[in-house]
Image (cartoon, rainbow, N blue to C red):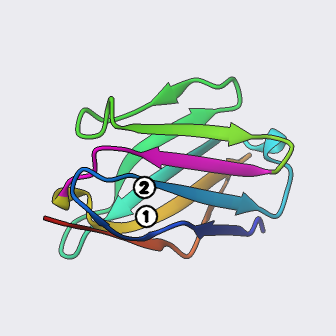
Amino acid sequence: QVQLVESGGGLVQAGGSLRLSCAASDSIFRFSAMAWHRQAPGKQRELVASVTSGDSTNYPDSVKGRFTISRDNLKNTVYLQMNSLKPEDTAVYYCYARLGSYDSWGQGTQVTVSS
């Protein structure tokens, strides 16, 4: 079982930036995909960014141009750079990794954007 540990969440004003980190217990070279999801109170968990082992990225329209996912293979860490944050970005952000047929999730980190 891969362990994923997120960090970097917090409280920020609208228009501000945060960078989330997800440290993996295994080499991320092995993962076919890694991603960030978020879940706001009363809402379903949604994908906000993904990156494949081939470095292909994908973003929903709601964050495109504001969020950037990147991976540091030497540090076994995936990042989510979030700029121009909006109050509607407030949620718990979860790191995700796919290894073969196994899905792993982190424990989540809270991001709160004040207006």
Q: Amino acid at mark 2?
A: His
Q: Identify the element where label 2 is drawn.
A: strand
| For residue 54, side relative to residue 20 (left or right) | right
* Residue closest to the eye, 12 or 35: 12
In the rendered structure, find residue 37 and report the number of the disc placed on it.
Answer: 2
Magenta region, residue range: 76-86
Q: Amino acid at mark 1?
A: Tyr
Residue 15 sits above or below residue 105 on the image: above
The C terminus sits in image quarter: bottom left
Q: Quadrant for residue 13, please give it.
A: bottom left
The reply to whether callout 2 and callout 1 are in contact (CB within 8 Å) is yes
* Residues packed near mark 1 inside 10 Å, few (<14), some (14 to 19) or many (20 plus): many
Label 2, label 1: how far apart the Cα atoms are: 6 Å
Where is residue 35? Give x, y as percent: 54, 47
* Residues packed near mark 2 inside 10 Å, few (<14), some (14 to 19) or many (20 plus): some
| For residue 89, side relative to residue 68 (left or right) | left
Q: Residue at x 18, y 61 (%)?
A: 87
Q: Identify the element where label 1 is drawn.
A: strand
Residue 53 sits above or below residue 33 on the image: above
Where is residue 100? Give x, y as percent: 74, 46
Q: Residue at x 33, y 29 (%)?
A: 65
- Magenta span includes 81: yes
What is the total number of numbered labels drawn onto the structure image?
2
Where is residue 47? Give x, y as percent: 38, 48
Q: Residue at x 55, y 59 (%)?
A: 95
Residue 37 sits above or below residue 52 on the image: below
Q: Residue at x 36, y 44 (%)?
A: 83
Q: Quadrant for residue 1, please give it.
A: bottom right
Q: On the image, numbered disc 1 is attached to which residue? A: 93
